[in-house]
Image (cartoon, rainbow, N blue to C red):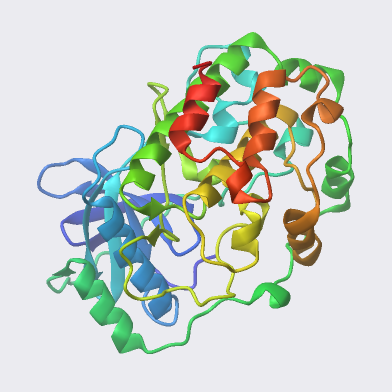
Amino acid sequence: MLDWMPPRAVGPYEVLSVIGRGGIGTVYRARHRTTGEAVAVKLLGPPPACDPMAARRLAREFEALRGLDHPNVVRVYDAGVQEGYSYLAMELVEGLDLRSYLSPALDASPYNPGEVGGAPHPELDVWSDEPETESLLTPAFDLAPPAQGPEAIRDFAAMMEEPETGGSRGQERGPEVSPEKVRAAEVTQLAPEVLDGLNGSPRRARLIDAAGQVCDGLAHVHAHGIVHRDLKPSNIMVDDARRVRLMDFGLVKLDTDTAQLTQHGRVVGTYRYMAPEQARGEVVDHRADLYSLGVILFELLCGRPPFLSRRPAELWSDIISRPPAAPASINPGVDPGLARIALRLLAKDPRQRFQTAAEVGAALRGG
């Protein structure tokens, strides 16, 4: 339940309904009031619903993406502050997240994001990290003119003067998980019918195509000095034309950053998908995104991520020091070439991974 109600409109956009909730805000379906164009608007509530760090990261997300033009990277249009709400307007991508798109259920019928809802087996749904969605319409009220641009968001953040929120590595607590899901997570090998679905030829073709597009998008952002730092299945969308978009750059790191938004030794991102150097709170480069891609690829090949712990301290230790299992020990029918790519991406030492996203894309496509 939200403890604040968003405005009916921000800037030139009419807010319509909730799409989902991410790390630093809620994303709404919206419409440009003049052109009628459908967009997505990431909205941060007024204090104390958001903190200055979240607002600064929203401004930096806009600055990172506004100069990019690539078919596999979400486009941004506008940013600003209105009535205490910081907002970022971006391309509306309608479709499925990567995990749902690669559900074996899609092999049984033509791809239709309006009808297919995700993995049909509980074993494959245990690791879902998607936000809860709901429809929400709010009353309109008198609007003051918006302050537009990333500097307006930074000025607003400075006015809040609140400390950075979020715990350090040792203070984090894991989510509550039902015993049924814990038991499912501890299954070493999935049921035969699930494995058959994972290894089907149509799904393998979709996986290679989608992962190759992810690599194309990553190569583009990395070439512009951008590290995503929170790459995971829910931040990768596939539309009804099977085109992949990299989404949610809220934790982006830029080579040109003059201010350090993340303190050294502080961990940001999603534990299950972060590289060892990121988990240690060290400064990361583009190879951290390649490790995250390895976690995603391993999960898509095996039906589970490389490390299963639901307790942050144990998961952190596994990421830092424990080698992942051989994919064939979990999924005997796994494609050996794809398994080798995943394991190389999961190397603890960044120097032992693929060094560029383009290299990964070439390997996936057999180049």
Q: Is residue 114 visible?
A: no
Q: Is residue 125 above or below residue 32?
A: above
Q: Is residue 242 left or right of residue 323?
A: left
Q: Is residue 120 above or below residue 314?
A: above
Q: Is residue 351 visible?
A: yes
Of 327 and 158, nearer the camera is: 327
The image shows residue 153 at horizontal and vertical percentages of: 26, 73
Q: Residue furthest front?
A: 351
Q: Is residue 100 above or below residue 66?
A: above
The image shows residue 28 at horizontal and vertical percentages of: 37, 52
Of 127 and 279, nearer the camera is: 279
The residue shown at (63%, 29%) is: 341
Of 183 and 292, nearer the camera is: 292
Q: Is residue 13 above or below residue 184?
A: below
The residue shown at (26%, 53%) is: 89
The image shows residue 178 at horizontal and vertical percentages of: 83, 53
Residue 217: name its quadrant.
Answer: top left
Residue 116: name its quadrant.
Answer: top right
Q: Is residue 98 left or right of residue 26?
A: right
The residue shown at (62%, 77%) is: 167
Residue 221: name its quadrant.
Answer: top left
**Number of on-image labels:** 0
The residue shown at (32%, 64%) is: 60
Question: In which quadrant will I find the N terminus?
Answer: bottom right
Of 214 and 52, nearer the camera is: 214
